[in-house]
Amino acid sequence: MKVPYGVYPDSFGSHIYSATFGVSLAMPVRHSLRTKRFEAIIDSGETRCMFHADIGRFLGLDLTAGHRERTQGIGGPEETWIHQVSLFIPGGPVTIFAAFKENLPVAGLLGMNGFFEHFNVTFLPQALACDLERIGSPDINER
Amino acid sequence: MTPESAIRLKVLRSAPLDSWIALSHDESRIVAVGRSYAEVSELSDAAGETDPLILKTPTEWEPISLIAR
């Protein structure tokens, strides 16, 4: 499926494009609360998927009860909390280990583990879009 | 830029910074603004939007590559 890049304002009064995708999350339990579709950035530089702590709280996660993980980034080390969640993506949901972080400036980042492992991703700069081809199967307990 | 992108850009420029916002399904208008994901989710329901797209706006519109990982 072809997904148009998202356009954002920049700090110069102009605009920039970013590869984004609308996803939703739930706890990996049948009939659990599911988020609405939220916009996350497709980011191959991210080791694993990372989401704003607010979304984890909405799902009912006790964030600091998760596995604490320090991550290294351009801005230095950051503290995140790892939890198992269901990520709803085209082709069926997958259960992933995702990081949750306070003060993330966006709702989510779709990284190598949890997202790129499920798609062949082709960036199409002239079309301002990316092509996502699902690989692998959804979870057995697909809802 | 496509007309849809131009409308989305105009909408995002009007959005409050450091907030959660819910866009209409076609991303042509803001249907709710909140201080948390839970709040904007509830307010988008109250606005009658059945398939919103929720975004977190940054404190400033800066290049995403500067995000600390």
Image (tube, coloured by chain):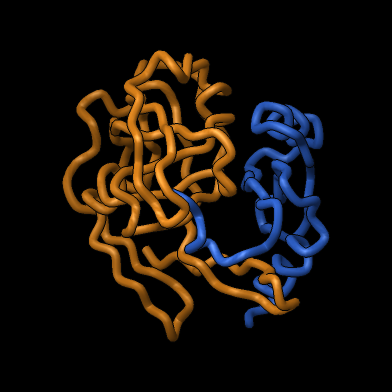
Instruction: Please tell me in which quadrant of the rendered image residue B35 appears.
Output: top right
Q: How many marks overall?
A: 0
Residue B37 in the image: state x and y as whole percent: 65, 32
Q: What residue is rendered at 70% in x and 79% in y?
A: A14
- For this rendering, which residue is in front, A72 or A27? A72
The quadrant the N terminus of chain A occupies is bottom left
Quadrant where the C terminus of chain A is found in the figure: top left
Residue A116: percent from left, percent from top: 27, 53
Q: Is residue A36 above or below residue B15?
A: above
Q: Indicate the position of residue A31 as horizontal and vertical percent values.
A: 44, 16
| Above or below A9: residue B32 | above
* Shown colour of chain B: blue
Q: Position of residue B9 (x, y in %)?
A: 71, 69
Q: Foreground residue, A69 or A30?
A: A69
- The residue sitting at 70% across, 50% down in the picture is B23
Q: Colour of chain A?
A: orange
Q: Is residue B54 left or right of residue A65?
A: right
